[in-house]
Image (cartoon, helix red, strand yellow):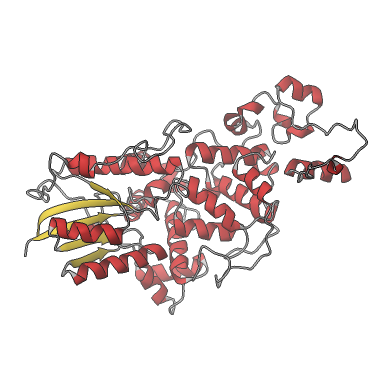
């Protein structure tokens, strides 16, 4: 039987290593490559402008690739459960294919859509290709429970063997005679611009990491040519505050599925072949296994992105200081290293993993004692690679709530950055207001003599004038202002 098929793109925004797309093409007479702007996943209050731009760039790239195969990408807005039944009828669909997604919302959504499709006699096929392995198989091999240590996960995947090899992208020959678009395609199913989506683009800086499969493969090829660097890569030894990234920055492309994790794995295996190389957990293979570890945990642990109801998460009585949370989120804690990192995050949608460690530790157990769930929300909004499972898992780890419990090992908001950037060049890049501060004061500008602060054109702090003997809190309608982090640190210095 020749099918009319929808291939539903969600995360796997690529043509290479896309077995569900290949399944769609098989026995197909008409193909509709579809992307749905789901109001739940694409909520403007939860998705920042950089992440939106990356998504739209990825969709444009995908459409460009499909055009070369005499096809197009169809983009619609709405809840999948409402949109798809209408398209099933409109296009006389007989087959639906998609890439398997392990997030709770996605599993619930896909179950509902599958039921709606099967009620109409539509064949539904899904394939696993967003992760290296079948996550359910890993849990099954661990007696029905997710492995809670990285080493245990490694033991299990050793038994399972290497990940499946990636499959090639479809060719023009594969896609011949499958065209299903009209002259009105752009009007009805075109990719909307950021402005058409009602997004404010005024804050957008230069697009350093363009979205899309072609950029993903270009970056992959670039780094795989650096065989010595790949083989000696050890993630803890990379710099969190280098002026250009000291890692591959392939994570956003893997998150959106512009780059297949299996393709990444096997390209690394080719580079490693016959050469001495670093090993997991610090190698690049090791980073992909960390991803698998948190994906497995997210599937096997209930309420994985919450503290309450999460069976592995320590229940902590976190503070709820909204002023401190806002200061952290808006890069105005008063600690230049922390504020520079949060500025980079807001401007570029990315920062080094050790920089993430520093600001996550600062927000939670290190300084502010604010819940990791609040930090998780900010990262979900602003990070290009804000992966649901990895975001929740890493925040639990960094807050010493799960997986890692040495809560006393904290990242200094002063000393840690100095290790790899004594002159504070990273701080000066993202906080140009401090660019004239001498290196010895750049991490602690409040320690600089007043004359140095004035010469630098930036006063680190100003004391409250004491001309009036009356307490300001006694004045009608004046509320005492909560102390800032810098105030607390000054107080601590005086005591010591």
Q: Residue furthest top?
A: 455
Image side of residue 104 versus residue 491, left or right = left
Figure label count? 0
Q: Foreground: 339 or 131?
A: 339
Image quarter in which the C terminus is found = top right
Image side of residue 308 versus residue 227, left or right = right
Residue depicted at x 38% and y 64%: 102
Q: Is residue 380 visible?
A: yes
Residue depicted at x 64% and y 32%: 424
Residue depicted at x 14% and y 56%: 91
Q: Residue furthest bottom?
A: 143
Asked if 489 appears above or below 143 in the picture, the reply is above
Q: Estimate the x, y position of residue 68 in percent, counting from the top left.
A: 16, 40
Q: Estimate the x, y position of residue 258 in percent, counting from the top left.
A: 32, 48
Q: Estimate the x, y position of residue 169 in percent, counting from the top left.
A: 21, 50
Image side of residue 313 versus residue 129, left or right = right
Quadrant housing residue 24: bottom left
Image side of residue 203 versus residue 111, left or right = right
Residue depicted at x 64% and y 27%: 433
Q: Residue furthest front?
A: 476
Asked if 411 appears above or below 443 in the picture, the reply is below
Q: Estimate the x, y position of residue 467 in percent, counting from the top left.
A: 90, 30
Image quarter in which the N terminus is found = bottom left
Q: Is residue 103 visible?
A: no
Q: Foreground: 268 or 10?
A: 10
């Amino acid at each position: 039987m020749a099918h009319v098929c929808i291939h539903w793109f969600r995360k796997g925004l690529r043509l290479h290593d896309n077995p569900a797309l290949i399944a769609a093409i098989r026995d197909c007479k008409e193909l509709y490559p579809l992307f749905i702007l789901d109001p739940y996943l694409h909520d403007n209050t939860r998705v920042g402008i950089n992440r939106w731009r990356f998504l739209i760039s990825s969709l444009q790239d995908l459409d460009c690739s499909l055009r070369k195969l005499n096809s197009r990408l169809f983009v619609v807005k709405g809840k999948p459960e409402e949109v798809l039944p209408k398209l099933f009828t409109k296009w006389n669909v007989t087959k639906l294919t998609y890439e398997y997604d392990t997030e709770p919302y996605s599993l619930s959504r896909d179950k509902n859509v599958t039921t709606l499709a099967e009620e109409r006699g539509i064949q539904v096929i899904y394939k696993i290709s967003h992760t290296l392995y079948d996550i359910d198989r890993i849990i099954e091999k661990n007696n029905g429970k997710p492995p809670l240590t990285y080493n245990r996960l490694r033991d299990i995947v050793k038994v399972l063997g290497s990940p499946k090899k990636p499959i090639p992208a479809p060719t023009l020959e594969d896609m011949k005679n499958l065209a299903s678009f009209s002259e009105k395609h752009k009007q009805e199913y075109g990719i909307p611009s950021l402005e058409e989506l009602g997004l404010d683009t005024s804050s957008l800086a230069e697009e350093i990491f363009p979205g899309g499969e072609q950029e993903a493969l270009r970056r992959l090829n670039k780094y795989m040519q650096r065989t010595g660097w790949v083989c000696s890569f050890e993630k803890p030894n990379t710099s969190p505050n280098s002026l250009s990234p000291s890692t591959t920055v392939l994570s956003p492309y893997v998150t959106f599925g512009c780059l297949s994790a299996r393709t990444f794995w096997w390209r690394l295996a080719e580079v490693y072949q016959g050469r001495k190389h670093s090993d997991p957990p610090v190698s690049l293979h090791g980073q992909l296994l960390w991803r698998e570890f948190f994906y497995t945990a997210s599937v096997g642990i209930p309420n994985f992105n919450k503290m309450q109801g999460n069976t592995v998460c320590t229940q902590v009585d976190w503070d709820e200081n909204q002023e401190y949370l806002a200061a952290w989120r808006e890069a105005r804690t008063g600690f230049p290293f922390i504020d520079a990192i949060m500025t980079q995050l807001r401007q570029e949608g990315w920062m080094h993993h050790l920089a993430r460690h520093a600001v996550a530790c600062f927000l939670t157990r290190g300084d502010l004692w604010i819940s990791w769930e609040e930090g998780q929300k900010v990262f979900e909004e602003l990070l290009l690679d804000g992966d649901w499972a990895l975001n929740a898992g890493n925040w639990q780890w960094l807050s010493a709530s799960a997986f890692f419990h040495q809560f006393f090992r904290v990242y200094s908001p002063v000393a840690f950055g100095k290790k790899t950037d004594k002159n504070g060049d990273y701080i000066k890049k993202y906080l140009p207001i401090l660019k004239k501060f001498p290196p010895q004061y750049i991490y602690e500008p409040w320690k600089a003599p007043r004359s140095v602060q004035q010469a630098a054109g930036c006063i680190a702090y100003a004391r409250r004038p004491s001309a009036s003997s009356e307490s300001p809190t006694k004045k009608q309608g004046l509320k005492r202002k909560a102390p800032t982090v810098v105030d607390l640190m000054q107080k601590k210095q005086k005591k010591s």
